[in-house]
Image (cartoon, rainbow, N blue to C red):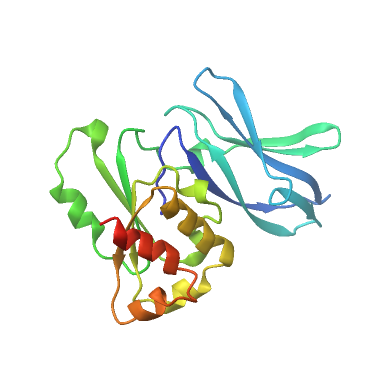
Amino acid sequence: LGGKFKAGFWNPIWLTLQAGPEGVNGQLEVVIPDGDQVPVIYGDQTAGELDLAAGETANLLLYAKTGPLAASVRVQLRGEAGAIWSQDITSQLTQPLLPTQELIVGIGPAVDLESVRQLVKRPPVTALAVSQVTAASDLPDRWWGYEGVDAIVLTTSDGNMLSQMSSDQCIALIQWVQLGGKLVLCVGGGGKKLMAADSPWSAALRRAASST
């Protein structure tokens, strides 16, 4: 999220593909070796399905559990006869964080989490890492997409971003909080609207408030 992820956790993977001159038809999968170097195939029959004409592009969001720090990440296209195309995308990803590091993700307008990171002095194995997501399209739509996140700082001053989040994205974040995720709220004048009984955020926000 925000260009950072932890090794050994479930993570969202956004992919953009363009079909060649013959088009594309099949199931896109992510292949990552586990701790024993056994390749594990991650697929989604709905989100990973491709049927593209020549030159057509598609944006996909898949989920996979990243392996050890040095594990490769490969995508493959599976047709009726098996894998028909594959490509290693490891070099296109940022270096994963250590599983023992703490990752704080800001959602919405930035609140200078980088300054906080600089103030926190820790050994490298537990170093604090921060990232920022400012577009709704860059958020997971399943709760396990937040598995490697230790805390989220949600700023609500940009009402447009919150309104642009899909129902699946809202539910994913709410479920993550309900399962024990730490949510820090920066709420201004829009607080009453978020906490209203008919707001999809109400349950998550009330839980977050009661746990502080």
114 versus 191 height, above or below: above
- Residue 118 lies, in percent from the top left, at 17, 49
- Residue 17 lies, in percent from the top left, at 66, 52
Of the pair 91 and 154, the residue shown nearer to us: 154
* Count of numbered labels shown in the rendering: 0
Residue 59: image quadrant is: bottom right
> In the rendered image, is residue 88 in sight?
yes
- Residue 67 lies, in percent from the top left, at 49, 29
- Residue at 57% from the left image edge and 66% from the top image edge: 167
Of the pair 40 and 54, the residue shown nearer to us: 40
Specify the farthest residue to the right: 80
Residue 84: image quadrant is: top right
- Residue 73 lies, in percent from the top left, at 55, 34
> In the rendered image, is residue 107 in sight?
no
- Residue at 49% from the left image edge and 66% from the top image edge: 136
| Position of the C terminus by quadrant | bottom left
Is 126 situated left or right of 83 in this image?
A: left
96 versus 193 height, above or below: above
Is 23 situated left or right of 203 in this image?
A: right
- Residue at 43% from the left image edge and 69% from the top image edge: 202
